[in-house]
Each structure stands twice: as C-alpha cells, then as structure tokens.
C-alpha cells in the first residue's frame, strides 16, 4: 500500500486518475447490445449558457456523475451523454440582449460566431 503524501499535487494526481479511468472500460457503452434490464441511461439536460455558472449547476451535474459512476462500478452498462443546447434559442436570445441587436442586424456567420464566443466564454468561467 502506498503512502499518502503530505501535500496534494493536482497536476500529478489528476493526470494519474484521468489515465486510470480512460484506460479502463468503465466509460464504454455498447449501443449494439443495449439491454433495458441491465443498461442505465441518464438523460442529461442541455446546459443553457445564459448566465454565469454557480454552485447549483455544479451540484446538479455532481448528482448525475455520482449515479453514473456508481452504476458503472456496479457493472451496469451506462449511457451518460453530455447534453447540449441543440436548438440554441436561449443562447441566441442572450447574445441579442448582451449586444443590443437582433440576429438579423448582422450577417448570419457573424451572429453564429457571437453565439459560439458567448458559449465558450460562459463555459470557461
């Protein structure tokens, strides 16, 4: 058994555990052999990037992650897709509000880029 270090080095330890999880088959899901009796599916809500993330956002995702990990470690085949704002309306509305424009006031590609920048900005905070 290894000794517990006096200090925590996240660069070392997080990389170690990330490799452990990626090298295992715990994150695999075989859609071809789906079985409703043994499969566990978590229907994830889309993250609407309309405001700053807060502890409540993190807590909600923690609950889902805990359930996924528990069932994976229990041997269940778990489908845990990461949701996304597929239709984009909340993002578009927020970009329009923040820039005091209507989406048709700028070229389509420019508005799309504004939406991407807004989403990336909100996801890195």
Image: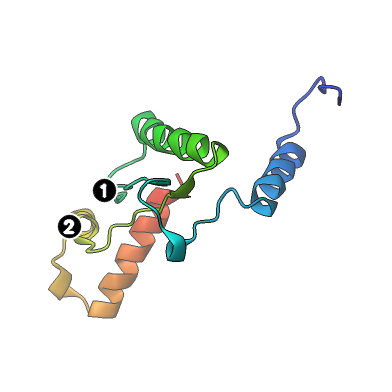
Q: Secondary structure at mark 1?
A: loop
Judging depth in this view, the residue of 32 and 41 nearest the camera is 32
Mark 1 surroundings: few (<14), some (14-19) or many (≥20) residues within 10 A: some
Mark 2 crowdedness (10 Å alpha carbons): few <14, some 14-19, many ≥20: some
State the residue at coordinates (33%, 57%). Answer: 84
Marks 2 and 1 close (CB-CB < 8 Å): yes
Tell me residue 3's x, y (percent). 86, 22
The residue lying toward the viewer, choosing from 102 and 16, is: 16
The circle on residue 74 is: none
Out of 25 and 46, give the one closest to the viewer.
Answer: 25
Q: Earlier in the sequence, mark 2 or mark 1?
A: 1
The picture quadrant where one finds residue 52 is top left
The structure residue drawn at horizontal position 45% and vertical position 44%, both measured from the top left corner, is 125
Q: Disc 1 designates what residue?
A: 50
* Residue assigned mark 2: 93
Using residue 21 as the reference point, say whether residue 61 is left or right of it. left
């Amino acid at each position: 058994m290894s000794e517990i270090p006096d200090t925590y080095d996240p660069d070392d330890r997080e990389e170690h555990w990330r490799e452990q999880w990626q090298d295992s088959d715990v994150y695999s899901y075989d859609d071809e052999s789906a079985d409703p009796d043994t499969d566990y599916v978590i229907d994830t809500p889309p993250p609407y990037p309309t405001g700053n993330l807060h502890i409540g956002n993190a807590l909600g995702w923690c609950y889902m992650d805990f359930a996924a990990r528990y069932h994976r470690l229990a041997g269940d085949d778990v489908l845990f897709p990461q949701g996304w704002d597929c239709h984009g309306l909340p993002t578009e509305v927020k970009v329009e509000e923040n820039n005091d424009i209507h989406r048709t006031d700028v070229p389509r590609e420019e508005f799309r880029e504004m939406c991407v920048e807004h989403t990336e900005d909100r996801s890195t905070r």
